[in-house]
Amino acid sequence: MAVTVKFFASVREAVGVSTESLALPPGVATVGELRAHLAARGDNWRAALESPALRMACNQVMCDAATPVADGVEVAFFPPVTGG
C-alpha cells in the first residue's frame, strides 16, 4: 500500500522535503501510526511531527490520528494556521 505524504510550512522546513510517496510498512494503518513511523526517522522528524499542535489531513479533509489510511490517499501534516 502506498500513500502520498505532504509537509507544509515549518514542518516542511524541519524535515527538508515537501512531498514524498511512501510504501507503508506492515502495522501502519492510521494517520497516527503513519505520523509515529515518520517521527522515528530521527530528531528533526520527531521534533516536527510530535508537536501536540500539529494538524493533519487525509485527502484534504482535517482528520485525527485514528483516521485509517488506504492505498492512494494523500496525508498532509502542517502547523496550526494563525491569522491576524
Image: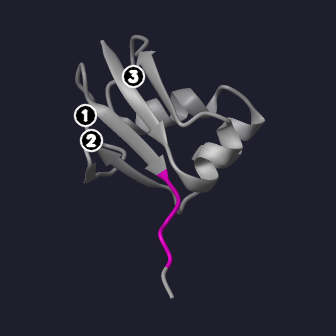
Which quarter of the rendering shows the N terminus?
top left
Q: Is residue 24 left or right of residue 14?
A: left
Q: Position of residue 79 (x, y in %)?
A: 53, 59
Helix, strand or loop status at disc 1: loop
Q: Is residue 79 covered in magenta? A: yes
Q: CA distance from mark 1 to mark 2?
A: 4 Å
Q: Which residue is mark 3?
A: 28
Looking at the image, which residue is at 70% across and 44% down? 14
Question: Which quadrant of the structure image shows residue 25?
Answer: top left
Q: Which residue is mark 1?
A: 68
Q: CA distance from mark 2 to mark 3?
A: 11 Å
Q: Position of residue 82 (x, y in %)?
A: 50, 77
Q: Position of residue 43 (x, y in %)?
A: 76, 36
Helix, strand or loop status at disc 2: loop
Amino acid at circle 1 = Pro
Q: Which mark is residue 67?
A: 2
Write down the region rendered in magenta. Answer: 78-82
Q: Predominant secondary structure in magenta? A: loop
